[in-house]
Image (spheres, rainbow, N blue to C red):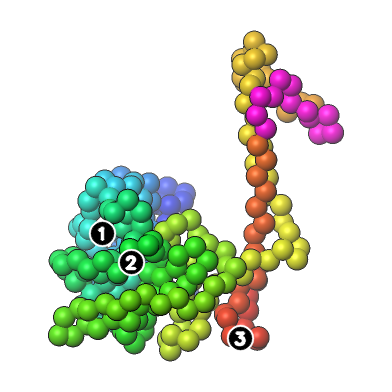
Amino acid sequence: MVYGVTQGGRTGVFSKRADGDDEEEVLVREEDSLGPVSDSWIPGSDSFVYTVVGGRGGLDLKRGTRGSDQAEDWLAGEAAECCFSPSPDGRWAVYASNEAGRFEVYVRRIDGSGRWQITSDGGHGPIWSKDGAEIFFTRGRRVFAVPVKTAPTFAPGEPVELFRFDFERMAEPWHSFDVSRDGQRFLMVERSFDTPVPRQIDLITGFAARHRPVNEGLQDYARRPRASRAPPAVDVELTVRAQWPRVVRPLGSQDDHCST
């Protein structure tokens, strides 16, 4: 498997056997970016494509090759490009870009040439099916499929909504699901409210109205007993609570599951 790491002084793309039975291999170092997000190997080759956070458009796609510590731009323009997914034959690739003002789904040849727009009403996290006949993507909490032909040239059909499901979404436009080899089952993180785990952010402004430095006000606030922490002179108090899922379960299966 290939994955991106931004932790403990390590920033780059790494590889390791899926069974964990070998040492981690450094594929590419990305010291000058905010971090890489691994996307995919290119079938039938030793090359891989990954998303760089902090590129020209905020997100750029780069291509690397095992055995070389250098990577080159696969697609790096003024827009943000990410979420690379190759066709099974390794000739085409689907990705997401906001070049039209919002994220849509596009296809190019594997060398980055050509350009076919797949969606016009928004699209995120595209994935090419294992049989090469469909491209899946999400829009909000809806999952769509687009029939495609790749020979003699690329020809997309119209997007068809498959289903709606209350699944946990990654920040747009990232992948929030995966698809089984036969294209009939989808792996998602189900939203659960049975046993909520609170996550709270309190945003407090207006300390300047107390005519004292902000740091002094925060230190005074932190020293108070929790029960009496009513911040003085608060102009705005914003509380955000998010409940996170506990179970990952393939749809259509009652047996396979894992806890997070």
Q: Nearer the viewer, residue 193 or 220?
A: 193
Report the residue that reaches farthest toward the top: 211
In the rendered image, residue 211 lying in the magenta stretch gets the answer no
81 shown above or below 152? above
Could you tell me residue 12's position as x and y percent?
Answer: 35, 56
Q: Residue at x 65, y 29 (%)?
A: 236
Q: Which residue in the protein does label 3 denote?
A: 253
In the rendered image, residue 230 lying in the magenta stretch gets the answer yes
Q: Nearer the viewer, mark 2 or mark 3?
A: 2
Magenta stretch: dominant SS?
Answer: loop
Q: Quadrant of residue 196?
A: bottom right
Q: Which residue in the protein does label 2 denote?
A: 119
Compare marks 3 and 1 and give the one earlier in the sequence.
1
Q: Nearer the viewer, mark 3 or mark 1?
A: 3
Could you tell me residue 224's position as x and y percent?
Answer: 79, 26
Instruction: Find the distance from the CA under tag 2 to the CA under tag 1.
Output: 23 Å
Instruction: Find the distance from the CA under tag 3 to the CA under tag 1.
Output: 36 Å
The magenta-colored residue range is 225-237
